[in-house]
Structure formats: C-alpha cells, structure tokens
Image (cartoon, helix red, strand yellow):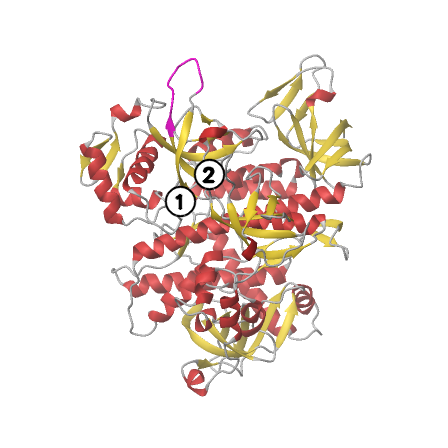
Amino acid sequence: MKKIKKSTKLPRHILDHLIVKLFRRNPNKIRNVKQVFEKLDVKNSLEQIEERLEYLSSKRRIQSLGDKSYKLSKKTTSSQHKQGKLHTGVVDMTKNGSAFIVCEGLEKDIFVSPRHISDAMNGDTVSVRVLNNRKDRRPEGIIEEVIIRQTEHFLGKYYENESTPWIMPVNNNVLAKITIDVENSLKAEEGEMVVVKITDWTNNRHQKPVGIITTVLGKLSSNDLEMNRILVDKGFNLSFPDEVIAESEALSEEISEEEVSKRRDMRNVLTMTIDPDTAKDFDDAISFQQLDNGNLEIGVHIADVAHYVKPGSELDKEAYLRATSVYLVDRVIPMLPERLSNGLCSLRPNEDKCVFSTVFEINPDFEILNTWIGRALIHSDKRFAYEEAQDSIENKDAEYHEELTIINSFSHHLRKLRFQEGSIGFETDEVKFELDEDKKPIRVYIKERKDAHLLIEDLMLLANKAVAQFIQHKAEGHEIPFVYRIHDLPDAEKVVGLINFAKQFDIQMKNRNPDELRASYNNLAKAAQKDEQIKFLEGIAIRSMAKAVYSTDNIGHFGLGFKDYSHFTSPIRRYADVLAHRILFENLGDNIQRVNKTDLELKCRHISKMERKAMESERESTRFKQVEFLEDKVGETFEGIISGIIDRGVFVLLKENHCEGMFSFDQFRESFEVQNGRLSAKGAKTGLKFKMGDSINVSISNVDIDKKQVTLEYLDHI
C-alpha cells in the first residue's frame, strides 16, 4: 500500500473522513472553516479545507449553517459501524498479530485480523473499512491505507544470514522481523544493536519489511538499550546526518567587524550565566549596570542561534525535524550538533558572543521604564552554577553579592506582581537521580528550588512576555504572525471533578470566571504546601488544565495570567525560539515583515507534537530509573502516601525515595469497592478503608524492570 508521508498533503477522501470524525466528537458543536483548519493536524491549506467542507455539505454529511459555519448532519450522526464505511483511527496491536483500531467518536474499537493488517504497525494512523455490521459481534475491518507512520526507525539486534541479514526489533509490539539490504549494513556484526530505517513497508507471510541501518550502536548495557529504545520509539534521531555535521563544522568562530558594527556592544557591561552545575549549553545570560541617571539596567541575553542556523540549511532542516532537545535521566539528545550547542552558540565565560537581547531600564522602585530589544554582543564575566549563585546571594563577602542581591530583589518584585495578576503557583516536585559510574541510580531526591533558580525563571518569563508584547504593539491592528506560547482555559468537566474532589478535603473552589478559578488553584497550591495529605490534589489540578502549546493564534496563557507570551529564551534547545528570533529580527526598527501564517501554524503544530514526545521520553526514562533503583530493595519496608486508586488496587508513593508502586486487592481475603470517584476504596467484609493521601506502611515484594512495575504489599496504616 502507498504510504502517505507526514510532509505530504492528505488526499481528498482521507481528508473528508478526518473532517467528519472531527464533527462526530461533538455532534452539536458548530465550527467555522478556520476552527476546522486549526483542529486538523494536516498539511493541507485553509482553502482546501474550505473546499472539502463545501463538498461534504453538498453530500449532506455535514450541515452548512451559512457564514462558513458547519455542524454534523443528523444523517451522519446516526451512522457508526456501517458495513463498508471507512473510518480513521490509530492501530493498537496485540501480541498475536491482530489489532484494534481506536477511532474517536466510535463506541467500539474495530477489530482487524492479522491477514488484514497489511503493512500497518502499532501507533500508525490508518483508514479502516468495516467488513461486518452484525449487532451480536464486534465490528471487524480491513486496513485500507496507512495515513501517518508512528515511526520509520527501529532499534533492534542484528543477525547475519547467508543470503539476507535481518534485525529483531527490541519493541515487541511492532514488527516481528526486518530484513536488511546487504549493501546498507554499515558493517554491523552479529549481535550488535542497530537503528534501522524502513525503506519498503511490505509486511506479509511472503515478504518482510526491508530497511537500511542508519546507526550501529554495538553491544549495549541494559540501561543504554532502554534509553535508546525510548528515543527511537518516540522518533528522535540518535545521531546527526553527515551533511549536518559538515555544515556545523564549516561555521566560523570569528565575529567580523562588520557584524560587530550591526550590534549593540555590551561587552563592557557586567554579564554572568547561572545554570546547573552539569550544563554545557549556556543559552541565556544576565547583565547588570547602574546608569548615570540613578536607574538600573538589567539585560536578558539569549544565544543568537538564528545568526548561525539559516533558513533552508541542512542545520535548519534537522533542527526543525527534532524541534527540541530531549533530556533523559543520564543523557541529552540535543537539537543542534555539539559544535553549536556547546560551542559557537553557548554563552561561555570570557568569550565574545552574539546574542539577541531584551534590556530593561528600571527605577529604584523596580518599575520598568524602557525596554530595548535587539541583537547585541556580550562577554560573560562569570559562569555560576546555581549553588554558587545562591551562595553569592546569601553571603555578603561572596563575588558579585551586591549585584545579585539587587537582581534577586527585582525578581521578587516581578514574582509578586505576577501572582497579583493571576499567575498560578503550583510547585511540582522534580525527581532527580545520583548515578554511579555505570549509570545506576544510587540516590533519588527532589530538586531544590531556591532564589537563584527562581531569579533566572522570573527574568526569562519577563523576556518572553516582552517580545510577545513587542510584536503585538508593532502590529498596530494589522497582525504580524508570530509564535506564541498559549495555554487555554481548563477543561470544564475536569474542573467540576476537581472541585468535587477538593470538597472531600474541605477545600472550596470556585469557577464562575477565569480569575476566580486561578485564585482557587492558588488556594489549593498553598494548602498543599502545608498538608502533604492533600498534595496529591495538585496533580489532579494540573491534569485538569489544558496543555500549553505553540500557536499563531494568541489566546493568552491561562496558567501565567499573561495576555501575551512567547518562547524566546532557549533557542539552543527549542526550535520555537529560533522561529521567534527570526520574526523579531525582521520586525526591528521601522521594518514590518509578515510570514505566511498558515505555514507558521503548521510548524507550531509540529513543534508542539515533538515537545509532547520529548516529555513522554523524559517521563519514561525517569520511571525506568525509579524501578531500577528499587530492584535490589525487595523485602524492604517503606512509608508511603496513597497516590492513586483503581479497580485492581492502590498506588503508593514512597516518601523516602519518591518512587511509586502498587499493591493489589488480591492480597486481601475480601473484595474492595472503589468509592467517591476513585478517592477511596472500602473492604466488603472488614470495612478496611484506603483513602487518597493516607500514610501507610508497605514492603516491596517484586520488581519487574522489563515491565517497569513495582509490586508492593500493604502492611498497615500509619
């Protein structure tokens, strides 16, 4: 079957099914052309979407309401698993080779037998045609076409064969076998781990998929194998193509006099970086100076990645494809090659560096009087680790104590204003690991956030807000398409559930308007800081919120309480920031340049998608290390807090090491009823009750590192 690549426009019949599926999600919802375009994650133009809407309306599959607005027609609403009907869904493979196609808007998944899978794989988006419509049987179908591949790369073990070498993928939920073109084996040896890119997807009993080896990883430890599997399964390249490396190596380190003349020279202004102790890519610096008029000047300087990475270059194509750096527990997969991320662009001390800056003039009362935005040249005087910067703030005899104390006071002022204006202050725990030389975790702890961390955070928020406001003011009523970081209002249904949860713990929340809801979230955050029994409610509150994404549609940022917000401060690790830099530069001074909004929106969607995959990868690596840490602790007893309740049992967060496991209700000689919206569970005979937030004693009975599962045994309540 023909594969439709992510970069191509979808054919009309597939686009029609995606549009109808969108309307099926909420049959009574009215959407206009622009809203349909923004909801569909496709490459087709706005005009093509409008054309298909008109066509579907003529066929009475959707109903036109005039003024380019539409809703689902009654005829379409009543049709679900009609025989012969084509649906779009995601493949959920089973171990025996069959699959269920999960389609939004359909009550039942569509079963597909192995003989009708064709070349589809787990996670692919496919079109599936229903073969039967019997009420007494589950709907069955045949996959017609793969619309979007979940991934084209696979990690597996290499095996030699007299005729054709092959690999067995590590992920058992994908292909059983991939044959390798002999000329593209990169001289891999028997038993080595390799990364393969599929070139021919044919997959049936007569022929297996064919691929080429892109990376030879050699013999791997269990840790390296798992980390690489996570990255490959999520679609991240483990290495850079040769042409990308060659292009990065060809860049000059010298900053020409012509380039210096185009920039604001701030090399004589006190400048410093504050980063984690292990950081190598310093993409932000801060400067400080007293002005002759008695005011202060604080600058936020960001690595000028766009100066080196030009649109259309191989570097640019690869950076866009990756979209973000990925931070696993024991490694970083950078968006840019090391030559740029740790070298040319990194704001290392005692080196002249090109930057894009926001410079704020403030009076002694910390009121911002003027903001300058533009390209500059800096020379960092000091590289601080967070711990060193904190010591300088606290110790009056430390280096740059006076300057950092003033900047810290400005930071406190900014934070106070932000919360007064509606910013939400949830403090989620960030789990960190101390690893031995074999990368095995020997300690698990929560990252401590002090003034030095918050100082940098506040200044970055200020800079991100400033550039978004600059573009808004520059447009003067005529939109300049830009990359905004937006955060929509929370899901109304989830908020109601949260309010009902909170009532169980005597916490009153209101949601009559956004400001009132923000205040309720903040009251919950304050209560959680004082009482660990209700700290779990923070997680529920965060899950009730929308996910922050990138978009050209500036709807504001609910969580921060900002009307205008962008991402500008981390271009070494985020492609969204590179795009923001380019648009800003083109609109400095008297210039007004407008990029194509449709193209920019499609880039925003890709970046948001890759950001989600990076976050999933980071969570998976953390979970693996947590389970690995507990591997040799079977039989040991721990205090824990009940963090979740499901029909099968209870999840417990261990206080000492912040790892999580579960004990099953099967260990008891009675059945349990889950009550109060999964807030509690009660034994049918003894009345033994488990409630969210309860402190209990448990022991570790089993650790399955392959499944990343920790099995606990309940001992008693504390």
Q: Which one is nearer the viewer's eye here, 80 or 431?
A: 80
State the SS at label 1: loop
The magenta segment: 129-138
| Vertical relation: 441 (above or below) 453 | above
Q: Which mark is residue 598?
A: none
Q: Which residue is mark 1?
A: 3
| Among the two numbered marks 1 and 2 on one chain, the one whose residue lies closer to the N terminus | 1
* 307 left or right, relative to 647: left
Q: Which one is nearer the viewer's eye here, 446 or 607?
A: 607
Task: Examine the structure image and report whether residue 148 is included in the region drawn in magenta.
Answer: no
Q: Which residue is mark 2?
A: 119
The answer to whether any part of residue 423 appears in the image is no
Point out residue 473 in the picture as x, y percentages from the top left corner: 32, 63
| Vertical relation: 407 (above or below) 93 | below
Point out residue 359 in the picture as x, y percentages from the top left corner: 46, 72
The amino acid beneath tag 2 is: Asp
Evaluate if marks 1 and 2 touch, with contact meaning CB atoms under 8 Å apart: yes
Point out residue 103 in the picture as x, y percentages from the top left corner: 41, 31
The residue depicted at 69 percent of the width and 16 percent of the height is 687
User: Neighbour class for label 1 at 10 Å: few (<14), some, many (≥20)?
Assistant: some
The amino acid beneath tag 1 is: Lys
State the SS at label 2: loop
Q: Point out the image quarter for the N terminus.
A: top left
